[in-house]
Amino acid sequence: MNAKYYRVLYHPVSEGVCFSASMGAEKGKDGVQMLYLSAGSEGADGELCPASARAERLHLLILADLKPLTIKRAEDICRTAVVDKILLPENKNRTALPDVLQKAELCEVDGRYEECFAGFTVKVFAAGPEEARVLLLYFGSRGVQPQTEECMMNVKRCLPELPCHLTVDAANLNCEMRCLLCRDYTQCRKHNRGDETYFVDGHLLLAASEGSDALPELKEYLAEEWKHIRFIGLPRNIDDAQPGELSGIGTPGHQRYYIGCADTAAAVVKAVECEEPSGTFISVSAKAGLCVSGCYAKR
């Protein structure tokens, strides 16, 4: 089948979050690998999730913050994988980065950053004061349309007994096809209707954010992508008001996944599950991540 495959992993490590994406892998061709790291609390410690540690090459490594654990994890990655480019928040007071990170192309983000890979768009937004600036991330398909292509998507738990790997092996797609054909899958519903003009398949990571002050400007920056969002990585310390501030995200009638953790306030879970007609809350932990995989194929 002439198709383009992708896989996205949400997997926290201790107090932080690890977001991995493999995109644009066509059979017999290599895809593009991307990794987003955030440490969470200052004193957190822990190992990278296995899926990230196995990456041999990363085209883009995004450091959501400059906390010691984020830098340490980035160091570990750069010692075992070839990293083309590293994005990090601009901070004039930061200490020098380890030498192993400086082997990659470094790009400090003080405002906005955009890049396109293999039919996908990556948009990065810098939020917060200079001394504590963090990077928020949007990731989604670009240029594919329901009129000419169809999309299948599988959303499942990533467990020790059912692990997911970052890299999509373009020469051997058994893992992807098993998920799509033999296990439960969630098709991008309504995309087969004649009046659909775009896919609702975007990911928005707010995990590194400390509050909602940046949301209005972020929404303005992502004006074109806002209706495409299906997956929302919630801030760890999200308050009761923020789910309401995220209302209007995505497209009505399409399922939305709000990804949090065991510490997410019960009121937030209630707001998502009870007040959002199409909202689903998913908690990820060190032992249970989330894997989103699928493909786009010509009709």
Image: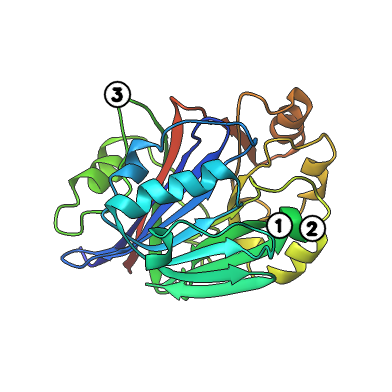
Residue 233 in sight? yes
> In the rendered image, which quarter contains the C terminus?
bottom left
Residue 197 in sight? no
Q: Could you say where residue 109 lies in the image, as x and y percent from the top left?
A: 62, 69
* Secondary element at image label 2: loop
Residue at image mark 1: 133
Q: CA distance from mark 1 to mark 2?
A: 5 Å
Colour approach in the figure: rainbow
Mark 3, mark 2: which one is toward the viewer? 2
| Residue at point 31%, 45% (across, down) | 180
Q: Is residue 172 left or right of residue 51?
A: left
Q: Amino acid at mark 3?
A: Glu
Q: Amino acid at mark 1?
A: Arg
Q: Mark 1 touching mark 2, by CB under 8 A? A: yes
Residue at image mark 2: 129
Q: Amino acid at mark 2?
A: Pro
| Residue at point 71%, 70% (across, down) | 221
Q: CA distance from mark 3 to mark 1?
A: 37 Å
Task: State how many labels appear.
Answer: 3
Identify the mark nearer the N-term, 3 or 1: 1
* Secondary element at image label 3: loop
Q: Mark 3 touching mark 2, by CB under 8 A? A: no
Q: Is residue 39 left or right of residue 93?
A: left
Q: Could you say where residue 157 lies in the image, as x and y percent from the top left?
A: 42, 32
Residue at image mark 3: 161
Identify the mark nearer the N-term, 3 or 2: 2
Q: Could you say where residue 98 lies in the image, as x and y percent from the top left?
A: 45, 56
| Residue at point 70%, 55% (across, down) | 249
Q: CA distance from mark 3 to mark 2?
A: 42 Å
